[in-house]
Amino acid sequence: MSADRRARSVSTPGPASGATPSAGRRVAVALLLVVTVTAVAAVGALSNAPNTDGWYASVEKVPWSPPNWLFAPVWTVLYLSIALTGYLLWRRGFAGPGRPSAMRRQLTLFVSALVLNALWSPVFFADYPLVGVAAWWGGMAIMVLLIVNVVVLAFAARSVSVVAAVLQVPYLAWLCLAASLNAGIILRN
């Protein structure tokens, strides 16, 4: 990678196309991303709430399972980094009003990761009382797809914003922990 390209990928001073979105558009997109990511977080919280003190409290967990109180602050930081990633990718790909983004692939990966993230909690937590252990297996399948998606997103984002790529590292680490917790519940119960 040339020094010039490396310098462009480390910071995101402007879009790849040279077009610059207005301040109003930048604020609107940032707010839209925060609202969207907050909605994903709310889906998870609403799915978890009635179950963490119910069936989840009684299942056998792996020894490295964090205390329940730790999940909310960790996810708060991760969701902020997810929103920032989306903003950085949108900003780098802005091609002008009414024109397709130059970051279509990266933004598609970003959106698919959000969708998978939003699906995991309802499947794993809320579906368990309805379908039993199949919910845990469904959650595991979603988690594996999400991990693969985030790895591909990190590599795709790296070409335009190293910051956006690096923001995926703690998210990926937490997803791997979550996958091990999901697998542990399957294997121990």
Image: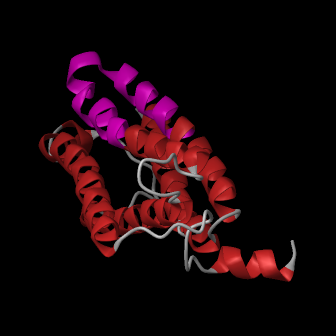
Q: Residue at x 26, y 63 (%)?
A: 28
Q: How many marks?
A: 0
Q: Residue at x 53, y 50 (%)?
A: 101
Q: Quadrant of the C terminus?
A: top left
Decide if residue 122 is on the left or right side of residue 173.
left
Q: Is residue 129 magenta?
A: yes
Q: Nearer the viewer, residue 79 or 159?
A: 159
- Magenta extent: 118-144
Tell me which corner region of the image, top left, top right, bottom left or bottom right, holds residue 128: top left
Q: Position of residue 68 (x, y in %)?
A: 26, 60
Tell me which corner region of the image, top left, top right, bottom left or bottom right, holds residue 157: bottom right
Q: Classify 169 as above or below 136.
A: below
Q: Position of residue 64 (x, y in %)?
A: 46, 59
Q: Quadrant of the N terminus?
A: bottom right
Q: Position of residue 35 (x, y in %)?
A: 23, 57
Q: Residue at x 42, y 33 (%)?
A: 139
Q: Classify 120 as above or below 26.
A: above
